[in-house]
Each structure stands twice: as C-alpha cells, then as structure tokens.
C-alpha cells in the first residue's frame, strides 16, 4: 500500500456525505493518524493550531487521541474543545482562522463512527477529500511509542457559539413558551437548554440517556414519532426540539408533537432570513420554488460538501443573502444577514441551533403556532425511509438496473400501486434515480453515503400518499436484486 486511498479501501473506511465514516473496529489509530496527517500537510499546510472536538459516542475519545497525536507530531498546537456540537467547533475555528477536526458518527449506527474536517473557511470540499486520499503513507512508529496525553479542556468554543445567538435575538422573546428538549445522547442538549432558558422559555427535559442513541432527523423512527405526540399532550408544549448526535441537524415539532420535515425547516429559516439565493439537494421539497418563483435556487447532489459548492456558485451571482440547507434540516449560512439590528456571520457547515431559534422566533413574531407557519407554505409533502444493512453493491445494482431498464421502472411503479395511466415525465440521475411522474408525484432512490442503506424519498400532494409510496417501494425493491 502506497497511498491513504489504498489503506482506506483495505479497511473499508470511506468519505461519506459529510466526513469520514467506518465501523469503529476499522478506525484504527493508524488510520485516524494518517487521515489527520494528510489533512494538515496537504490541505492546511500553514496551520499552527488546530481545534479538536468530540460527540458522546464511547469510541470518540480514543479516535480523538490518535488525531491529536498526528497534530502533535507535526508540531501543531492543539486546542481541545471536548464534547460540543459540530457547528460550535466549526464556528470557533472559523473565528480563529484555524482548522478543526470533529470526531463524530453523526446519526449513523452505534457500531460506527467517523470525523469531519474543517479548514479556516469551513467544511472541506469533495476536491479536498481527493487530495487527502492521495496522500502517500509514511513509516511511523510514534503511535506505538506514545503514552496517553491529557490535553486541557478549552471551553471558549461553546462560549463564542452561544454569543452568536444571544447577540441577535431579544433576551426574553420566548417568555411564556413551554418547550420540550428531547435530550437523548445529543452533544447539543445542554447548550440548547441553556439558550432556551436564556430567552425566557420554560424548558422541559425529555429522555436524557447515558448510552448513545443514533437519531436520524431525515428518517424519524415510529417510536420517536409516538414519543413526541405523547410528550406534547402530557406537557402541553408549544414545541419539542432536538438534534442528531453531533448537533448539526435539528429535529423540531409543532405544538401537537408532529415533527417537521427538515426541508420544510430549511424553507422557513430561509424565509425568516430573507434569503434570495438558496442551495439545497435534489431530494428537498419543491415547495421551495413554489413558495417564491423569484428565488434563485440551485439543486445539488446530497451531502453538505455539494450544498457548499452550490452556495459558492450562488455567492458569485448574489454576493449576499445566500443560504444552504439539507433535507435533514441542517442550515448553512453563506453570507452576512441582519437580524434584529445585529449581524449574523456566515457558518459554512450545517447548524441546528439557528433553525430551532428562527422557527420559534417566527412563530412568536407572527403570533401564530408553528403548525400555522408550516401551513402557509405550498402543500407538498415528502417522506423518506431506508432499508438497513444492504450492501453498497446491492444498492448500486438495483439503481443502475432501474436506470438502464424502462420496463423495470414501469414494473416498480406498478408494484407501488401507481395507476397505469401515470407516466414518467422526467428522470434525474444527479444522485441515484429520481423519477418525476405525470401526476406530479416524485419517487427517488439512492444509496446512502454514510451507511450500508438504500434510501427512498417521495413527494406528493398529501402526507399519507408520500408515506405509503416510501413504505411500499422499500418492501418491493428487493425483487430487483
């Protein structure tokens, strides 16, 4: 093996939609060390300091130790920020103009983990990923000789991140509101509670856990849907908020305990900010374009690096008012915005805190419930779910077979229960296979970039139909293996 790419393939370690992802057992110290060395020497060669953070997964600490070993061997000063949300670490690094690495598996299963890289300007691009993987391997025995180091905890990142929001919203704008915080094992749980309390809300803590719980904000489990409905009724809540494990994807419910779809969250945040140029992935709700025909939108592949590339393209046209978001609810800020007379600075990575606060603020300022905010939008409904533990090869075979065979496309529609009079209006292969039908239904299949999963997305004019399409499609899709 001569390059990091070869080492990665042999150990089944890959870049996902956002960052490196693998089974914990495959993220050996040498793998973590080599990725860090490649990032710092090839992407950030002039770095003098680096910020390191972790989520609450048990395996994150040992991964961080290998990462910090590589930085130390390169003579780089380590600022260890400990357990904190990914956007807090990224914002801190951007403020200090230094690189950062966040150890997190985000929402993927417990037996996996990973890490995300940030340059002083924000999350790395797909071009950076290729550069990192091209790195030649070196003979290095320092990990074997090294004794465990204890790095002092630096809490400045959390302080700066909180100030980002306390500076733009009125101190008591949530007075009188009862807001539940679904804590589980989110690394953002404490800062969310602190901010909501600061803004005057009565905070009700819900289900804090000591074991790690992978929460996927794009495919909320039936169990979590039922929990939210029960909590809302039991505690008479105005909203329930939460995030995924590393705090860069929000989960927000209305006053009835119904979770908002992430792409609806993105539209509401964009409207609150007054964004004129928006980058979002191909699977996000088309209510975006329907809500304002004058918006300049750019649809990308799924994954924050692609959304960021889209934002950079839009910034050349707009110069200001640029926002990006994903179907998981994470929002990225590409330019300065003014809120309540204060400046909101750019943050070139997904954030969950801004969406939570802006939707609550929009509800308060408009004097209407969150559900009524949502109902103001064009009524297009999305749904998504996935088949777990299906190999990448199987997913690829299914999708490529459907792309190449129009008869199989028609067969799938028939199995789903689509009327034979409905035809396929257009196909989009930007990321997987996305079929737009003559009745305005949308069905989208793609291989997950983070885990061995086949994902299905749908969009129709009512929620029940969208849910049924996804459920039925995933039940029938294996017949194409």
Image (cartoon, rainbow, N blue to C red):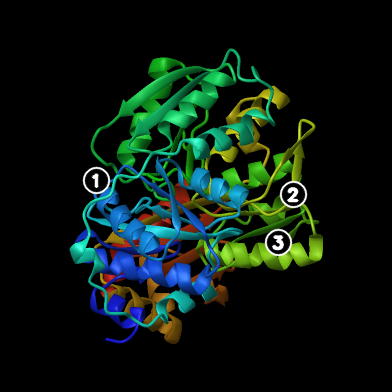
Residue toward you, 434 or 169: 169
Residue 135 percent across, percent down from the top left: 41, 80
**Callout 3 secondary element:** strand
Q: Which residue is labeled 1 in the image?
A: 58
Residue at (65, 20) in percent of width and height: 171
Q: Which residue is mark 3?
A: 297
Residue 339 placed where, x, y %? 75, 35
Circles 3, 2 touching at the beta carbon (< 8 Å): no
Which comes sooner in the sequence, label 1 or label 3? 1
Q: Secondary structure at mark 2?
A: loop
Give left or right: position of 367 versus 117. right
Binning the other alpha carbons within 10 Å of mark 1 as few (below 14), some (14 to 19) or many (20 upward) gives few
Q: Give x and y (percent) for residue 451.
A: 32, 63
Viewer-proximal residue, 315 or 370?
315
Q: Quadrant of residue 460?
A: bottom right
Closer mark to the observer between disc 3 and disc 2: 2
Label 1 to label 2: alpha-carbon separation: 39 Å
Q: Image point 27% across, 32% down: which residue?
A: 209
Mark 3 to mark 2: distance in Å?
10 Å
Q: Which residue is mark 2?
A: 275
State the separation of the CA atoms marked 1 and 3. 40 Å
């Amino acid at each position: 093996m001569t390059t990091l790419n070869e080492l990665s393939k042999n150990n089944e370690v890959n870049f996902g939609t956002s960052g490196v992802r693998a089974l914990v057992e495959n993220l050996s110290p040498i793998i973590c060390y080599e990725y860090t060395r490649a990032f710092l020497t090839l992407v950030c060669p002039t770095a003098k300091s680096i910020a390191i953070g972790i989520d609450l997964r048990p395996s994150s600490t040992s991964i961080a130790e290998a990462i910090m070993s590589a930085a130390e061997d390169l003579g780089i000063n380590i600022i260890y920020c400990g357990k904190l949300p990914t956007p807090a670490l990224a914002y801190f690094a951007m403020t200090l103009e230094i690189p950062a690495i966040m150890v997190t598996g985000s929402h993927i299963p417990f037996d996996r983990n990973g890490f995300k890289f940030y340059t002083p300007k924000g999350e790395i691009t797909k071009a950076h990923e290729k550069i990192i993987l091209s790195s030649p391997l070196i003979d290095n025995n320092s990990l074997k000789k090294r004794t465990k180091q204890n790095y002092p905890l630096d809490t400045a990142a959390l302080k700066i991140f909180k100030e980002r929001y306390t500076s733009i919203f009125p101190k008591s704008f949530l007075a009188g509101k009862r807001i539940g915080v679904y804590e589980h094992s989110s690394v953002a749980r404490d800062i969310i509670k602190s901010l909501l309390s600061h803004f005057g809300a009565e905070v009700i803590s819900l289900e804090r856990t000591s074991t790690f719980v992978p929460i996927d904000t794009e495919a909320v489990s039936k169990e979590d849907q039922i929990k939210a409905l029960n909590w809302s009724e039991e505690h008479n809540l105005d909203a329930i908020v939460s995030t995924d494990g590393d705090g860069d994807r929000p989960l927000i419910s209305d006053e009835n305990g119904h979770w908002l779809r992430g792409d609806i969250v993105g539209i509401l945040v964009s409207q609150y900010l007054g964004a004129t140029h928006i980058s979002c992935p191909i699977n996000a709700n088309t209510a975006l374009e329907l809500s304002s025909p004058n918006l300049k939108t750019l649809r990308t592949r799924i994954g924050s690096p692609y959304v960021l590339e889209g934002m950079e393209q839009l910034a050349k046209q707009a110069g200001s008012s640029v926002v990006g978001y994903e179907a998981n609810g994470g929002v990225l800020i590409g330019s300065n915005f003014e809120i309540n007379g204060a400046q909101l600075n750019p943050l070139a990575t997904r954030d969950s805190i801004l969406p939570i606060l802006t939707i609550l603020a929009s509800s308060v300022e408009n004097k209407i419930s969150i559900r009524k905010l949502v109902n103001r939008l064009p009524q297009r409904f999305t749904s998504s779910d996935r088949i777990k533990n299906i190999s990448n090869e199987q997913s690829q075979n299914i999708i490529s077979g459907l792309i190449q065979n129009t008869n199989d496309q028609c067969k799938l529609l028939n199995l789903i229960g689509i009327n034979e009079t409905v035809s396929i209006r257009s196909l989009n292969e930007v990321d997987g296979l996305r079929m737009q039908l003559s009745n305005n239904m949308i069905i989208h299949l793609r291989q997950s970039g983070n885990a061995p999963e086949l994902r299905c997305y749908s969009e129709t004019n009512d929620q029940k139909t969208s849910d049924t399409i996804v459920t039925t499609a995933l039940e029938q899709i294996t017949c194409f293996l």
